[in-house]
Each structure stands twice: as C-alpha cells, then as structure tokens.
C-alpha cells in the first residue's frame, strides 16, 4: 500500500454504462469497500457514481486546516488493506485521502468510477426489477443500488437572522476556502464540534481576533498522538502480524468504551475526571473561561473530542468564547444575545452535517412511488441498518443505527459490505429478482434497538446531539459492541425478506470492465 495514486480522468469521465448489476453511489470508504467486495466475488458488472471530480467522500471534502482522524490510524483503514506507512498514530486528512487513492489503484477500482455523476433521482420499477438511476451525467439502470453516501455528506448551515446580509467572507468547514487568507482578520467561528476543535487552533494564531460562538461545550480529552517511528513502520512492513496485533489492541481498547457508555454507568466518572483535569491543566488561571468550557452533561453523550491544542488556543489573548448565542448577523458584524456587536471579517461555520435528514433520501423512490424521505418522515429506520421496507434491492451503507460514538466506522462498513455480498450471492443462486425486508421484521428490530438505547449515555446523557433526530429518537448509533453488529449481519437472512423471483436473467457478468 505504498504506491502513489495517479488519477485517470479519461476513465472516470467515460460514458455511463447503460445497465449494470450494481450501482454504487459514492466513492468514500463505503463505496470503495463495497467495490472491493464485489471484485472479491468476481462481480465486475458495477459502476461507482461519484458526484465530485475525484474519489474520497468526506475525506476528500474536508480539507480544513488541522483535519485529521480521531480514531487511531491502524484501526481507521480497511482490514484487507493495512497501511504500514501511517506517519502518525492519528492520521491527517491528506494521508487518509492518499490512502483511499492507493486502495483505488491497488484494487483496480478506477475504471469503475464515474465522476461528476451526482445521483439526482433513482426510481424502483417493480415490473423490470430494476432501479433507474438518473445522474447529472445520464441514466444507468441497475438491478441493485448501494447507497454509500454517508451521513457526513451535506454541510449544515445555521439559520441565523441576517446571515445573507453579511458582506464579509462566509464558508463551512467542509467547504474550506483556501483562496481566502485569514491572516490578520477578525474571525467568527460558529460551532464546537469535532471539526471546529481541529481548525480553531490552526487559525487562531494568524487571526487578529477570533470569537468562538459556543452553544454547548464539548468534552475534550487528551489526544495521545505521536509520530510512528521508522522502526515501527519497518516492523509493520516486514511483519504484518505486528500491525494486526496493534489494530486488535486498538479495537479492544475502543470497544471497552461501550462498557461505560452503555452497560456500566458507574464507569462514567473516570472520563469525566480525565476531561476536567485536562481542562484545568491547559487553562490553569482563568476560572471564568474554564466554567464556560465545562460541559454539564455526561461524557459520551455527544461525540467525545480529543485535542491538546484546543483549550490553549481559546486561552490565547486574541480569542474569546461567546456563550450568549447569536441574535443577528449584520453586514460587518455579529450581534450576540446580550446585544454586544462583534465586528468580523469572516464567519466560518463548524456547524456539522445533515445527518438525520440526508439528501439522498429525497432522491430515492421506492416500490409504492414514495420517496425515502417521506417514508422516513417519522424518523430513519432500516433493517440491519442496511435494507429498507418498500425499497427493494436497495442497500444503505452507514445506514440508520450503524453509526458509532466509540470505534472505527470502517469496521461497520466492512460488516455491512459482507451482508450485501451475501445477499447478492443468494439472489443470483436462488433466482431472486427483488428483495426487501418485511415491515414487521424491521419494526421488531428497531424496537429492540431503541430499547437497548434507553439508559445509554447517548440517549440519556443530558445533552442534545446529532445522534438524535428532531423527535429525540436516536436513529444514528449502533448501541452496543461492534462485534455484536458484525455477528448480526454475518449472513444474509432471506427469511426476513419479501422476495420475488427474477423476471429476467440478471445482467450477465461482463468479460470486460464497465
Ligand atoms: P457537529 O459535531 O455536528 O458539530 C456542530 C457544532 O455546531 C456543534 O457544536 C453545534 O452546537 C454547533 N451548531 C450547529 N448549529 C448551530 C447554530 N445554529 N448556532 C450555534 N451553534 C450551532 O459537526 P462537526 O464538528 O463537523 O462534526 C461532525 C462529525 O464529523 C463528528 O461528530 C464526527 O463524526 C465527524 N468528524 C470526525 C472527525 C474525525 O476526527 N474522525 C473530525 C471531524 C468531524 P451544539 O453542540 O449545541 O449542537
């Protein structure tokens, strides 16, 4: 995994195939993992539809200063493509994106990718047992549709009075404007999530002033980041087992968080003590600032953040943490709820993503002609976090209740990919043309998941988070150990599905790539 990627635009911009067995939407970790899985099953009749001009998903889009992973690198990679060359224990965005590019090259995925092919509509046709997928580059018909669009795809902007009258520069952390020089500027940052705590320390030193509008203080724990030494890398290259063991150690360590987040409430005191000590150590003198930055909810209720730079940045003389909230935005300033006007040149939104109202749901039309967004009007739900009643032959990677607050999402993606592969194998072997989970099975599983979430720190930790939808239901997180999820999706359970015999032979296996 150490060759350099060389994107081949001539392939990615080639015309769309007219018909494929599988259309994969998105080329982030989900789409790439699915594509490798298909190739491992000798399934080459697929296409990857990518809306942007390159592969990578959220790790292509998030190029803000300081962007890095807060899951250790050895765990934040495909199990089938270890990278012995990670330079740090927590890889940075450029390194992760380069890793994705190398996966594309190593597994020969580039010829399957079509860039600029944003899916605008996909409609299921029960008569032909096919999805008609309309993209900005044309239409492709697919027997199976795999949505690998993920929850961190569409930036969410705050609805602030007067924002459209602002005459300075405005951008979102996921759409960073690198052409704009922040040096010497008066900057306002809105939001204190995983993104903001990474970019704030990078831009604070160059700002004339930085005001951080904080609605809720996050729990921030120390970041045990360090360079991976050349000797370690040498060992990982020569003895892959050593890296597997390192990965296993990280996996087990991260899984142990579930004990406190879910099962043993008494353990929740420990991360709280660590978080408070971290804050006191990094801001020893300013009790008022410490008070503003002290959360009043349990650790884990929102995603736990790790940083050694965030608190010192906020403790700098040119930084101010504003907790009063924003009343309005004027052409050159922000007025807070206490009536204080803050002159600013640039506003940066660190306000997150449309997680429980993902745009892809507006674009998928199921068997009864309803859009997925309508089907989900009372909240997202799926079976095994992957398939949806009334939406035959649709698989959603990182679907409802498969997100994690404690471990690597790539583990979940690989689990789901295994389930989808099994479904496709069974469909071919058993002559199934269409499959969708039975509604009572979906309901039973979701009731069980919601029950398991009761009493967990994610539901009852005393905060509002993007884990919860607007009705307060947790439709995003898997509530337990991840190996329990993997066990649940270990094989495709046809009996939980309504299946229809194939009306036509599945699209033939092509001898050449699409
Ligand atoms: P986020 O966690 O959703 O945080 C959004 C922040 O914006 C929150 O502090 C929120 O306040 C605030 N906010 C939203 N609307 C607001 C408004 N109208 N007025 C004031 N404040 C407002 O978004 P994110 O930081 O981009 O992170 C999203 C997810 O991306 C993370 O949870 C994580 O899964 C992923 N991520 C991962 C990494 C990584 O290292 N792997 C790095 C970055 C991001 P409240 O807290 O009060 O809601």
Image (cartoon, helix red, strand yellow):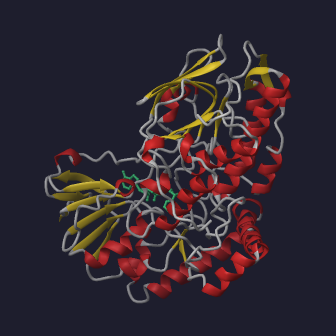
Residue 366, image x, y percentages: 59, 21
Q: Quadrant of the N terminus?
A: bottom right
Residue pictured at 56% horizontal, 43% vertical: 472
Q: Position of residue 489 (x, y in %)?
A: 79, 43
For residue 72, side relative to residue 133 (left or right): right
Q: From the image, which quarter does the C terminus lie in?
A: top right
Residue 45 horizontal side relative to residue 432, left or right: left
Q: Is residue 302 visible?
A: no
351 or 65: nearer the eye? 65
- Taking the view exactly as shown, the residue that stands out farthest to the front is 511
> Is residue 214 shown above or below 139?
below
Task: Tell me if residue 140 can be seen.
Answer: yes
The foreground one among 63 and 333 is 63
- Count of residue discs: 0
Q: Give whichever of 174, 443 is nearer the camera.
A: 174
Asked where in the image residue 38 lies, by quadrant, the reply is top right
Residue 427 drawn at (x, y percent):
79, 27
Q: Is residue 454 above or below residue 299?
A: above
- Seen at 68% across and 61% down, the residue is 81
Query: Which of 196/470 is in front?
Result: 196
Residue 25 figure quarter? top right
Residue in the picture at 64% in, 68% down: 83
């Amino acid at each position: 995994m150490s060759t350099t990627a060389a994107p081949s635009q001539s392939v990615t911009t080639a015309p769309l195939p007219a018909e494929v067995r599988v259309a994969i939407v998105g080329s982030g970790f989900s789409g790439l993992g699915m594509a490798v899985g298909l190739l491992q099953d000798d399934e080459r009749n697929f296409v990857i539809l990518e809306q942007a001009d390159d592969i990578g998903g959220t790790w292509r889009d998030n190029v803000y200063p300081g962007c890095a992973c807060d899951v250790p690198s050895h765990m934040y990679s495909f199990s089938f493509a270890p990278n012995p060359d990670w330079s740090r224990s927590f890889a940075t965005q450029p390194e992760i994106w380069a890793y994705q590019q190398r996966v594309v090259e190593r597994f020969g995925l580039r010829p399957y990718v079509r860039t600029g092919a944003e899916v605008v509509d996909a409609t299921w046709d029960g008569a032909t047992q096919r999805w008609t997928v309309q993209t900005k580059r044309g239409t492709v018909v697919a027997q199976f549709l795999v949505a690998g669009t993920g929850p961190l795809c569409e930036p969410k902007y705050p609805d602030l009075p007067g924002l459209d009258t602002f005459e300075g520069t405005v951008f979102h952390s996921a759409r960073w404007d690198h052409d704009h020089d922040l040096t010497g500027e008066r900057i306002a940052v809105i939001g204190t999530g995983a993104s903001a705590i990474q970019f704030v320390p990078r831009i604070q030193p160059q700002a004339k002033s930085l005001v951080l509008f904080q609605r809720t203080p996050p729990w921030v724990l120390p970041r045990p980041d360090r360079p991976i030494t050349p000797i370690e890398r040498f060992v990982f290259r020569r003895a892959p087992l050593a890296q597997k063991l390192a990965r296993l150690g990280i996996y087990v360590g991260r899984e142990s968080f579930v004990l406190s987040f879910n099962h043993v409430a008494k353990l929740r005191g420990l991360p709280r003590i660590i978080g408070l000590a971290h804050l006191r150590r990094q801001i020893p003198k300013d009790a008022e600032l410490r008070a503003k930055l002290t959360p009043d909810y349990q650790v884990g209720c929102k995603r736990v953040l790790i940083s050694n730079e965030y608190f010192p940045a906020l403790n700098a003389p040119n930084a101010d943490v504003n907790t009063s909230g924003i009343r309005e935005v004027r052409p050159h300033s922000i007025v807070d709820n206490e009536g204080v006007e803050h002159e600013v040149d640039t506003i940066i939104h660190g306000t997150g993503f449309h997680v429980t109202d993902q745009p892809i749901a507006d674009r998928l039309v199921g068997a009864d002609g309803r859009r997925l967004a309508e089907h989900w009007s009372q909240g997202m739900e799926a079976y095994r976090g992957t398939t949806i009643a009334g939406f035959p032959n649709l698989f959603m990677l990182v679907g409802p209740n498969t997100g994690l607050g404690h471990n690597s999402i790539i583990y979940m993606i690989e689990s789901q990919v295994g389930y989808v592969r099994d479904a496709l194998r069974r469909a071919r072997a058993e002559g199934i043309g269409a499959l969708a989970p039975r509604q009572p099975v979906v309901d039973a599983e979701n009731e069980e998941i919601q029950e398991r979430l009761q009493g967990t720190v994610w539901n009852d930790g005393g905060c509002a988070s993007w884990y919860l939808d607007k009705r307060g239901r947790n439709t995003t997180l898997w509530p337990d150990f991840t190996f329990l999820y993997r066990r649940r999706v270990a094989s495709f359970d046809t009996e939980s599905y309504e299946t229809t015999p194939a009306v036509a032979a599945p699209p033939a296996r092509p001898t050449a790539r699409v």
